[in-house]
Image: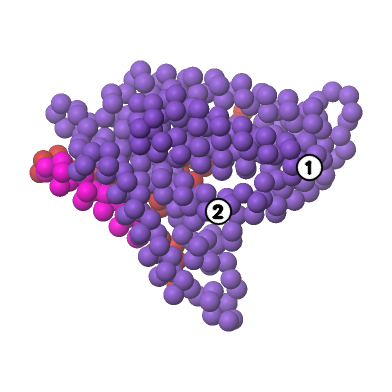
Chain colours: A red, B purple
Amino acid sequence: MRGFIRGFAHFWYDFLIGDDWKIAAAVVTTLVMGAAVLLAFSPRDLVFTPIMGAGLMVAFVVVLRIDTRAK
Amino acid sequence: MDAAAWGLGTAVFLASTVEMVEAMTIVLAMGMTRSWRSTLAGVAASLIALAAFTAAAGYALVTWLPEAALQLVIGTLLLIFGLQWLRKAVLRSAGRKALHDEDQIYAEEVEQARSAGAVSSPGLDWFSFVVSFKGVFLEGVEIVFIVITFGLNAHNMPVAIVAAVLGCALVAAVGIALRHPLSRVPENTLKYVVGLLLSAFGTFWSVEGLGVLRPGRESLEWPGEDLAIVALVAAWFVLSRILVAVLRRTDPASSPTAPANQTVR
């Protein structure tokens, strides 16, 4: 039973988070920050959405930079 | 069919094709080396499990989540999914990660099947049943996830379903005809394209879905509405090419003393 639960949890972790947890962390962090800005300042949609898109791209670059930095 | 439906259909078709190629490799390895009867029984069982999973997941998503929340949840999942693919594609294009090789994976599966002991002729061969069930179910869940997320968000489930069925049927037909893993499918390029599409749609929907947090719970608007998806595909593509170029220029593996393709997990 324990093996089944572990396998089940492993499957969903693998499926949702994948082999690099930093991608999921970067996406969620950026969206949480965006949500905070949205609630605090109520920016106009047409300004806020492209900025969020750019923010997600910056987050991706940061993850890739961490992955490939010289050790 | 309008442009949005074609975009939806193309994204789902390509993603399904890539996932189906991986499932086909496992099925062929088990069928050719152990038992076709048990392998096909595993495939049939996984298809039944997938149908139940699809019905449950689709019903739960549609019934319990308001539209903006749906966009936020599945847009975020899609984005995580897409960026994983895009990350690997960038690293592969930059020579920082070994290319996906279906022939090598097939050889590994065959070796595993042979080392699992002899096949007992009467009854079910559990090894090939379980491996093919697991392989088809895992890849199938990814296809189902893509169909549900794309179909629901684009309000066009029929196109998403038909595109996925076409992608799977095409790979199955070619695989059955050749009886060989589909290593000639440009899988790395397809994964790059699918990664771009998933990332663009995921960005669009996850940001749109943040509107669920505001009073009124309505989705946020992108400039140009759905056309913003095209701009996002272009933006992710340009960013990925810049990253590939930068990583190639600074590749430690390009030094004559360093081993290639070993820099990143």
Q: Residue furthest bottom?
A: B256
Is residue A56 left or right of B93 when viewed as pictured?
left
Amino acid on which disc 2 is placed: Asn
Amino acid on which disc 1 is placed: Ala
The quadrant of the image that shows the C terminus of chain B is bottom right
Residue B32, position as x, y percentages in the image: 80, 39
Question: From the viewer's perspective, is the residue at label 2 or at label 1 nearer?
Answer: 2
Q: Is residue A58 magenta?
A: yes
| Residues packed near mark 1 inside 10 Å, few (<14), some (14 to 19) or many (20 plus) | many
| Residues packed near mark 2 inside 10 Å, few (<14), some (14 to 19) or many (20 plus) | some
> Which circle marks residue B158 in the picture?
none
| Most foreground residue, A23 or B70 | B70
Residue A13, position as x, y percentages in the image: 49, 40
- The answer to whether residue B103 is above or below residue B174 is below
> Which circle marks residue B113 in the picture?
1
Q: Is residue B231 magenta?
A: no
Residue on which the image places disc 2: B188
Residue B134 shows up from this direction: no
Chain under disc 2: B
* SS state under label 2: helix
Chain under disc 1: B
Is residue B77 left or right of A18 when viewed as pictured?
left
Pick whichever of labels 2 and 1 is earlier in the sequence.
Answer: 1
Q: CA distance from mark 2 to mark 1?
A: 26 Å
| Residue at x-position 42% and y-position 25% | B157
Dividing the picture into quadrants, the one containing residue B155 is: top left
Q: Which residues are magenta?
A: A43-62
Residue B166, position as x, y percentages in the image: 56, 32
Marks 2,1: beta carbons within 8 A: no
